[in-house]
Amino acid sequence: ANGFICSLEVSGQEVLIPDRDEKKAVSISLFDNSGGLLPEQNRTEMIYKCGMTTWQAARAGPFILVLCTDFTVKKFSAKSRQLLTSITVLPLQEPDKVKNPYALKICGDRCYVSYINHHEICAFSVNDGKRQAEDGFVGHRGTVNAFCLGSTGA
């Protein structure tokens, strides 16, 4: 990744980096099985071309999800790098007043998106891209980066 990097996510043995200037996301295998750094010559890089400015990238099982400034989440096959679908992630309330999507978090089979200077956090299915609630979480100006999504399993 050579361009402007606004965030990174560590997922298992890889680091996911959105490269805003180059309009792509990059996955770099950075760690070995014990969590140590791989020597530079042993690191592999996978590029996911988005064609527009990217904000964040995250792994959801066999998929790489990339949040883009056109209010989409690009869903790629992590292995083949093939673009599988684009999920529209516009907020329900006042979508014409929202500047940009800002943050992406994955929790189970849902992805959560928050927006710059907007009070809504929306949930979408990782599997089929469908909105997961009629209304997003509203009434605050925080982002999904401001809270931790925890498991409620038994």
Image: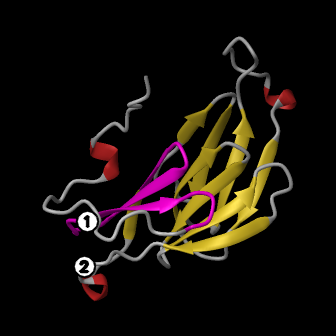
Determine whether, in the image, residue 88 is placed left or right of residue 141. right
Neighbor class of circle 1 (other Cα within 10 Å; few <14, some 14-19, many 20+) is: many
Q: Are marks 2 and 1 in contact (CB under 8 Å)?
A: yes
Instruction: Give me the residue at 55% from left, 49% from top.
Output: 109
Could you say which quadrant of the image residue 128 lies in? Answer: bottom right
Q: Is residue 77 visible?
A: yes
Could you say which quadrant of the image residue 148 lies in? Answer: top left
Q: How many marks?
A: 2
Determine whether, in the image, residue 47 is placed left or right of residue 154. right
User: Does the magenta segment cover residue 107?
Assistant: yes
Span of residues in magenta: 104-129
Provide the residue designation for mark 2. 93
Residue 126 or residue 115, whichever sits in front: 126
User: Does the magenta segment cover residue 128?
Assistant: yes
Q: Is residue 1 visible?
A: no
Residue 7 placement (x, y as % from top left): 47, 48
Q: Earlier in the sequence, mark 2 or mark 1?
A: 2
Residue 120, disc: 1
